[in-house]
Amino acid sequence: KKKRERFDVVLMLSVTKWIHIHAGDEGMKNTFRKVKRMLKRGGRLVLEPQDWRSYKKKSHTFPEHVKENIRKIEFKPDMFDAFLTSELGLVRERQLTPPAGAAKGFDRPLVVYRKEKKQTQEGKEGE
């Protein structure tokens, strides 16, 4: 049996929109599930969720199948936090605010989540 690699930190910077518009809601959720499996216990996910407005900002330049994917999205970026914490059992540790004067497009906050080191009280596996 092949041993899975485990990581202390997974960075998801400026990628959620692209995964989401190409793979849809289930693809985005599956990506988060895979990241959780890849994290060591106590490992961290550093997430830079892209705002929903950015999905549509240049959508006129996207191929028709991508535009259709965007129209079908129900799992909006403001729902990511609840999914990561309630569904997957990650712990939201902090939100890092970008410095004043950050370049446009890179002025989004980073959110840090931690994978539990042991099983939680609710019985969710902290794997």
Image (cartoon, rainbow, N blue to C red):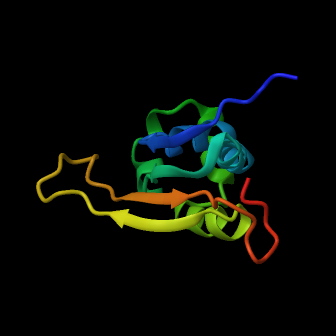
Give the left or right position of residue 60, taking residue 70 as reference.
Answer: left
Above or below for 82 versus 115 = below
Rendered location of residue 10, percent (x, y): 51, 41
Q: Quadrant of residue 89?
A: bottom right
Asked whether 124 or 84 is in front, the reply is 124
Rendered location of residue 60, percent (x, y): 46, 39
| The residue positioned farthest toward the left in the image shown | 101
Residue occupying image coordinates x 82% and y 71%: 123
| The residue positioned farthest toward the right in the image shown | 1
Give the left or right position of residue 17, taking residue 32 as reference.
Answer: left
Above or below for 99 versus 37 = below
Above or below for 99 versus 104 = below
**Image quadrant containing the N terminus:** top right
Rendered location of residue 109, percent (x, y): 34, 59
Above or below for 120 versus 80 = below
Residue occupying image coordinates x 61% and y 57%: 115
Residue occupying image coordinates x 59% and y 66%: 79
Is residue 87 something one can see in this rendering? yes
Is residue 69 something one can see in this rendering? no
Rendered location of residue 61, percent (x, y): 45, 33
What is the total number of numbered labels drawn onto the structure image?
Answer: 0
| The residue positioned farthest toward the front in the image shown | 118
